[in-house]
Amino acid sequence: MDKELIIRSGSSAVDFALLKDGKLVELNKEEDDSNFAVGDIFLAKVRKSVPGLNAAFVNVGYPKDGFLHYHDLGPQIPTLLKFIKRVSTGKLKDYSLQNFTFENDIDKDGSIVDVLKSNQSLLVQVMKEPISTKGPRISSELSLPGRYIVLVPFSNRVSVSQKIESKEEKDRLKRLVKSIKPKNFGVIVRTVAEGKKVAELDRDLENLVGRWTAMCKKLYKAPHPSKVLGELNRASSILRDIFNDTFTSIWVDDETLYSQIRDYVAEIAPNKESIVKLYNSNVPVFEKFGIERQIKTSFGRTVSMSKGAYLIIEHTEAMHVIDVNSGNRSNKAKNQEDTALEVNLISATEIARQLRLRDMGGIIVIDFIDMAKPENRKALFDHLREEMSDDRAKHKILPPSKFGLIQITRQRVRPETNIKTREVNPDGDGSGEIEAPIIVIDKIKSDLERLIKKNHKKITLSAHPFIAAFLTRGFPSPRSQWFFDHKRWVKIVPRDAYTYMEYHFHDKTGEVLD
């Protein structure tokens, strides 16, 4: 499995595309004005506590106040408040917490009004970016993520990622971390730490403690609200979270950004520094790697898949709904049950990709094609879980219901990636918008495959001259590629009378093929 990260730098934003075996699986954007990214820490002020919600609204500098629930305070909130007060006034200049006296933990079933007061200073961390009309979701249980570990101030707990299956490795990592961690700091060991030596963990820990110290220095006489610790830039945070030995290349089209990323990779994985490459070409980097085309075909209400199957994705206020359709297709399956299983498995793979690509969160309901056999429903469920195992967002998948529905909850931490792919109808017939014109090529290809399977011999395609020219020019042209794939030559006839999106297949007698 090859992974490539393609980075495109613009005047106001940087785009990151993650490819898995050439297929686009994640798309991220870092904008210059993104001041409320997940992981940012703010020195904020409590606006008011609401007993009915057992939560407080906190001024973090966003037009809408941040939402802080009692369960997101953290058990050591009294200690944190005491620490902030002493550091802000200059009475405490030792930020190591070595000799800092801790307060008692709060009651897990207590009330927010007993803990927080209006106009109180508080350190909070963004858990969920502002979405729609809502302000950011925040927490006062702070954590500083590194490459191999996550540092948790005001705690002494050491925990290891559940994705590390070996008990011996878990015990080894826990033992190593306990030997190097500073007093009154908790540590969460990340999955990528598996097999790492103590020197690498210690270096990561020192870096995080340095970030904590730098943040604390900013608290003295700091204004309210103010950002005291920003997340790494999006490129570094993506690499920190997903980079592993399966990465084969990282392409960057900006020299400054290239130097930054190369230095970061050299720091976290010296043996992989050479895979970071500077892209120099007149062809845009997203165009070169086929990303623009994949964006056009992957976003939108309808998503086409192999063998004629397709998805319909609808978004409502409460949830996302995905419908699986087999389409007009013929295959070698012996019966309807086998056809349904085949389409469902193909769809599950694409759905897992779509959730990551669009960063869809909340409740997702998928209407798969009904299957009668319990073993097939289990096979589908297991396959979907396996396909979503690489998803970094927290998620839960329920088994298929009696109606063939699968429900998924997926963590939503930032607004959904929504790219408009529909365009004004070039035919000008008053029908409004249409799917991206590039999609018509995929539809032609799909229809052709269907007709070839029906054993039609001599096939002629009639299309608008622009479409006809696109299909016949270049080497290999799309038509040549069809010949290589199906050993069938298709005659293409330009028709001036056709609209841009219109096309028809004909047999040797001139009859239209459906």
Image: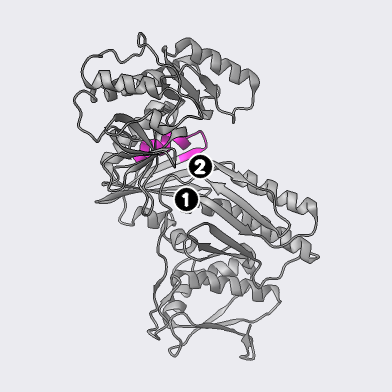
Which disc is residue 228 wearing?
none
Residue 238 drawn at (x, y percent): 41, 39
Q: Is residue 237 magenta?
A: yes
Q: Is residue 391 above or below residue 147?
A: below
Q: Is residue 406 magenta?
A: no
Say which residue appears at 37% left-offset and 18% top-offset. Answer: 206
Residue 459 drawn at (x, y percent): 61, 81
Name the one closer to the observer, 77 or 10: 77
Name the one closer to the observer, 292 or 181: 181
| Quadrant of res 41 | top left
Q: Which residue is mark 2?
A: 393
Name the one closer to the observer, 332 or 69: 69
Q: CA distance from mark 2 to mark 1?
A: 9 Å
Say which residue appears at 23% left-offset and 25% top-offset. Answer: 218
Q: Which residues are magenta?
A: 234-248
| Residue type (three-letter) at the residue carrying disc 2 | Ala
